[in-house]
Image (cartoon, helix red, strand yellow):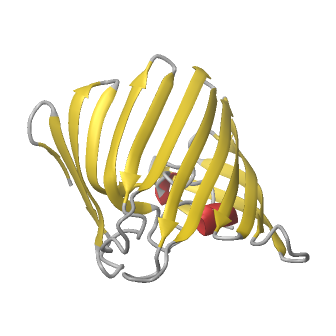
């Protein structure tokens, strides 16, 4: 549900009847200009491009391993959302988001008195090329009153789109207290039949402890997408 409360005040609410609780997003945007919008409520944490992409726009059925395991919000099992406030906007070839979040995930009360910082900047020098960088710095408490531990994330991403072909990649470095984690993926897709039949392939890797051996998991995925409409498709992976 999208609501235009006024010319400069907009709202967005999303529910998922399969989940419990059902509330996914509840955000209010105060639009000052294209370059500055204040957003507050529950919404996507601005980190990376895949975590903030709707499942209906993914070339694959599942998100890549490092995104599911490391992207803020998804690492807590709350589909990439959290409660907070951001300043976001677009100017020339740049767009940005800077904000503070509870750090506990969606539909959850804050578990400590600290706010987590999340920031993302993207540059699009050409219509076919996008480059992004993301930063997350926070402290996580499993429940109220428990000690807070470091929860930091750094990410880089790129996307190229040329005609029927797309190529996307993302790298995430993470620190959870004393554990260094790392993951990355690269994914390519090509429309064999324009806007109808698409083939895709992805490689992703996740290392849950860079100081330990033999714990990296690599996943190879091949996919086929048959589109009935822009947002309606059958996927086989």
| Res 165 seen here | yes
Q: Total number of numbered labels?
A: 0
Looking at the image, is 77 positioned above or below residue 153? below
Residue at 37% in and 63% down: 102
Residue at 33% in and 82% down: 20
Q: Nearer the viewer, residue 101 or 163?
A: 101
Residue at 75% in and 72% down: 208
Q: Residue 217 falls in which quadrant of the image?
A: bottom right
Q: Is residue 87 left or right of residue 212?
A: left
Query: How far across and how far down the image is residue 26, in percent?
Result: 24, 58
Query: How far across and how far down the image is residue 193, in percent?
Result: 65, 42
Q: Residue 156 falls in which quadrant of the image?
A: top right
Looking at the image, is 179 positioned above or below residue 200? below
Query: How far across and how far down the image is residue 39, in percent?
Result: 28, 44
Q: Is residue 72 left or right of residue 66?
A: left
Q: Which image quarter holds the C terminus?
A: bottom right
Looking at the image, is 223 positioned above or below residue 158? below
């Amino acid at each position: 549900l999208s609501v235009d409360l006024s010319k400069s005040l907009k709202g967005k609410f999303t529910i998922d009847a399969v989940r419990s609780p059902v509330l996914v997003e509840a955000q209010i945007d105060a639009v000052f200009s294209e370059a500055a919008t204040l957003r507050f409520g529950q919404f996507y944490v601005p980190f990376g491009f895949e975590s903030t992409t709707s499942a209906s726009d993914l070339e694959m059925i599942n998100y890549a391993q490092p995104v599911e395991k490391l992207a803020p919000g998804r690492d807590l099992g709350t589909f990439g959302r959290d409660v907070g406030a951001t300043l976001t906007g677009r100017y020339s070839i740049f767009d940005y988001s800077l904000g503070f979040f509870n750090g506990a995930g969606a539909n959850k009360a804050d578990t400590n008195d600290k706010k987590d910082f999340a920031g993302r900047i993207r540059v699009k020098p050409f219509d076919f090329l996008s480059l992004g960088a993301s930063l997350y710095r926070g402290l996580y408490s499993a429940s109220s009153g428990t000690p807070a531990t470091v929860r930091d994330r750094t990410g880089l991403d790129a996307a190229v789109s040329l005609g029927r072909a797309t190529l996307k990649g993302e790298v995430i470095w993470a620190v959870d207290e004393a554990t260094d984690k790392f993951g990355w993926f690269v994914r390519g897709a090509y429309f064999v039949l324009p806007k109808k039949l698409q083939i895709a392939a992805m490689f992703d890797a996740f290392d849950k402890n860079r100081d330990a051996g033999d714990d990296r998991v690599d996943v190879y995925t091949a996919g086929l997408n048959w589109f009935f409409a822009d947002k309606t498709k059958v996927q086989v992976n």
